[in-house]
Image: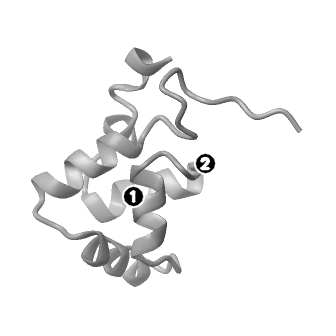
Amino acid sequence: MFKIKAADGTNNLSGKQIARLRKEKKLSQRKLATKMQLLGFDVDHYFIRRVENGERFVTDIDLVIFSRALDVPVTELLSAADQRL
């Protein structure tokens, strides 16, 4: 199977935006994972770390739950994506 990576070598385009927004909202990775769990998405802080570091691919479902937990539109999670391609 052939996998496409972003220009910076990461496996997703949203990780840096998610990290920025999480820090702006003064949430730890653990607290963000807890918010996502309360929305019915079974993740832990390791999942958040891997997404933010670009180690994990992100699905559309992941993006929707991140947007709900961070209370931002999905487009904001991808707002810097065009600069990273």
In the depicted view, which residue is nearer to us: 56 or 82? 56
**Rendered residue at 22%/57% (across/down):** 22
Q: Earlier in the sequence, mark 1 or mark 2?
A: 2
Q: Residue furthest front?
A: 9
Residue located beneath label 2 in the image: 57
Q: Position of residue 53 (x, y in %)?
A: 42, 49
Q: Position of residue 37 (x, y in %)?
A: 42, 81
Q: Is residue 45 visible?
A: yes
Q: Is residue 67 above or below residue 31?
A: above
In the structure shown, which secondary structural element does the residue marked by tag 2 occupy? loop
Q: Residue furthest right?
A: 1
In the depicted view, which residue is nearer to us: 72 or 26? 26
Residue 19 lies left or right of residue 12; in this view the side is left
Residue 27 lies left or right of residue 61; in this view the side is left
Dot 2 alpha-carbon crowd within 10 angstroms: few under 14, some 14 to 19, many 20 or more: some
Q: Amino acid at mark 1?
A: Phe
Per the rendering, the mark at residue 66 is 1
Per the rendering, the mark at residue 24 is none
**Rendered residue at 31%/37% (across/down):** 76
Tell me the mark number nearer the camera, choosing from 1 and 2: 2
Instruction: Estimate the spatial distance between the alpha carbons at disc 1 and disc 2, rounded to whole Å.
Output: 14 Å
Colour convention = one colour
**Rendered residue at 62%/30% (across/down):** 5
Q: Position of residue 24 (x, y in %)?
A: 11, 52
Q: Is residue 75 above or below residue 61?
A: above
Q: Amino acid at mark 2?
A: Phe
Q: Quadrant of residue 79?
A: top left
